[in-house]
Image (tube, rainbow, N blue to C red):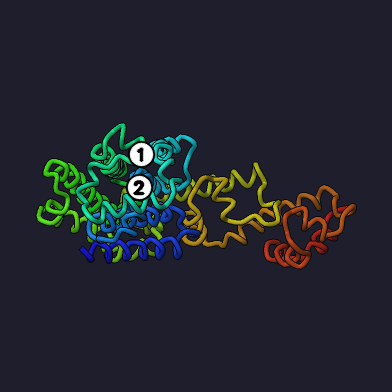
């Protein structure tokens, strides 16, 4: 069972890799990285308690990390939902998903703060005979529900979230089956299918293993001989290896819309995407006209994405492929138009051109002049001079 320890270490490495390279640009990857980390931690705990024969490892693994098992399901759910909705932020209503973890943490808190000699005593008993796990009652949760119910509740909880996530995926595919944003990137559908499939194989086999272990009352015998052990290993290996068959997720999962339809072609997906891109332009123009966020010196495309409640990479695609204009030029055009309005209202008689430029969001006089020339073909001072007195 050294393989289980190796797989757990590989899972930790994979989780670090995912989060390190993608967290800033694709926040939803944080959920996936945390999910892989906790699955790997679960594997490490299993190895430490059942196979390591180390009293120290058993002391470290026993109880301490058990409350984190109630986070595995919600993390998987949040990740799948963030890809389908293209929105990674949690709403206030999402925090109820953490209630089981908090309740279990409260129940085991006395053990967590107990002196280390007490924990090493439990660890020594487990290392000598792993079958004793089913008879230990170190916390209120174990005394109230029994070890069997506690362990089963964790895997059943995860399985429930995996099934919920799979249901959401099926519903999305059925409801949005004509949406090119999804169908043009079929690797995402395949990736989510693989992720949820292997997750269900792993968690269901683990649930059956735990259930049958208590029936046989021989932990080592059952976990060594039963075919479910092999199925569990397949689930874990498939889960940890699958990202390397979908390398896109190692660098985020951009869901950019499909290119607009070419002239002379008619296709339902293309037409849908053109209307989607048009709606982005309409929302952006309306926001700039009414809220005037461009007047802020540091206003960026990321800020506009937040205001429009759209993914930033959708905006980037819109400006690059549909509008054929950089966001900087788009923003500066609005600033120049605002500057022209101020000049026509007579502000140039009261303020310097540099001050007018700063009122319009430009960071410096030179940037204002260059942008003005680019839009109008003349400098701000020439524009002022040409106005009727």
Q: Nearer the viewer, residue 265 or 13?
A: 13
Residue 163 seen from this side: no
Give left or right: position of 186 versus 82: left
Say which residue appears at 47% left-offset and 61% top-offset: 321
Circle 1 residue? 139
Identify which residue is drawn at 38% across, 58% down: 253
Q: CA distance from mark 1 to mark 2?
A: 9 Å
Task: Judge the density around disc 1: few (<14), some (14-19), many (≥20) Cα neighbours within 10 Å.
Answer: some
Do the residues under discs 1 and 2 have CB atoms within 8 angstroms?
yes
**Vertical side of 363 occupied by 166: above or below:** above
Q: What is the count of numbered marks?
A: 2
Please state the horizontal and vertical placement of residue 8, each as a whole percent of the image.
30, 61
Residue depth check, mark 1 versus mark 2: number of the one nearer the observer: 1
The kind of secondary structure element at disc 2 is loop
Which label is found at residue 63?
2
The reply, left or right, for residue 74 in relation to residue 335 is left
Give percent across and percent down for residue 138: 34, 41
Say which of 300 and 1 sits in front: 1
SS class of the residue under badge 1?
Answer: loop
Q: Position of residue 297 (x, y in %)?
A: 70, 56
The residue drawn where x is 12% and y is 51% is: 222
Q: Which mark is residue 357?
A: none
Which quarter shows the N terminus? bottom left
Q: Residue at x 29, y 55 (%)?
A: 124
Is 172 or 340 nearer to us in this picture? Answer: 172
Q: Position of residue 188 (x, y in %)?
A: 31, 55
Q: 12 left or right of 341?
A: left
Q: Is residue 325 above or below residue 64?
A: below
Determine the image quadrant of residue 331.
bottom right
Label 1 vs 2, first from the N-terminus: 2
């Amino acid at each position: 069972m050294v393989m289980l320890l190796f797989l757990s270490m590989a899972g930790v490495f994979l989780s670090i890799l995912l989060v390190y390279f993608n967290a800033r640009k694709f926040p939803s990857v944080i959920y996936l990285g945390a999910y892989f980390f906790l699955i790997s931690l679960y594997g490490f705990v299993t190895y430490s308690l059942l196979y390591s024969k180390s009293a120290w490892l058993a002391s470290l693994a026993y109880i301490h990390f058990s409350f984190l098992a109630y986070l595995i399901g919600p993390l998987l759910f949040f990740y799948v939902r963030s890809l389908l909705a293209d929105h990674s932020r949690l709403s206030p209503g999402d925090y109820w998903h953490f209630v089981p973890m908090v309740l279990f943490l409260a129940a085991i808190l006395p053990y967590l703060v107990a002196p280390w000699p007490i924990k090493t005593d439990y660890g020594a008993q487990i290392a000598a005979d792993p079958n004793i796990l089913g008879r230990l009652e170190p916390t209120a949760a174990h005394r109230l529900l029994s070890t069997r119910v506690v362990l089963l509740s964790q895997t059943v909880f995860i399985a429930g979230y995996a099934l919920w996530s799979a249901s959401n995926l099926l519903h999305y595919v059925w409801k949005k089956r004509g949406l090119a944003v999804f169908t043009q990137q079929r690797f995402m559908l395949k990736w989510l299918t693989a992720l949820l499939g292997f997750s269900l194989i792993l968690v269901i086999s683990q649930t059956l293993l735990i259930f049958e272990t208590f029936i046989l009352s021989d932990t080592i015998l059952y976990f060594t001989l039963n075919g479910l052990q092999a199925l569990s290993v397949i689930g874990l290996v498939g889960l940890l290896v699958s990202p390397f068959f979908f390398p896109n997720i190692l660098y985020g999962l951009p869901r950019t819309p499909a290119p607009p339809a070419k002239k002379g072609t008619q296709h339902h997906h293309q037409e849908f995407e053109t209307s989607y891109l048009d709606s982005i332009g309409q929302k952006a123009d309306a926001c700039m006209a009414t809220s005037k966020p461009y007047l802020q010196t540091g206003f960026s495309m990321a800020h506009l994405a937040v205001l429009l409640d759209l993914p930033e990479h959708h905006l980037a695609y819109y400006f690059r492929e549909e509008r054929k204009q950089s966001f900087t030029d788009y923003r500066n055009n609005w600033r120049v138009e605002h500057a022209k309005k101020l000049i026509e209202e007579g502000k140039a008689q009261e303020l310097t051109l540099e001050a007018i430029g700063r009122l319009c969001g430009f960071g410096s006089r030179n940037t204002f002049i260059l942008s003005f020339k680019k839009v109008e073909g003349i400098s701000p001072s020439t524009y002022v001079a040409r106005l009727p007195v």
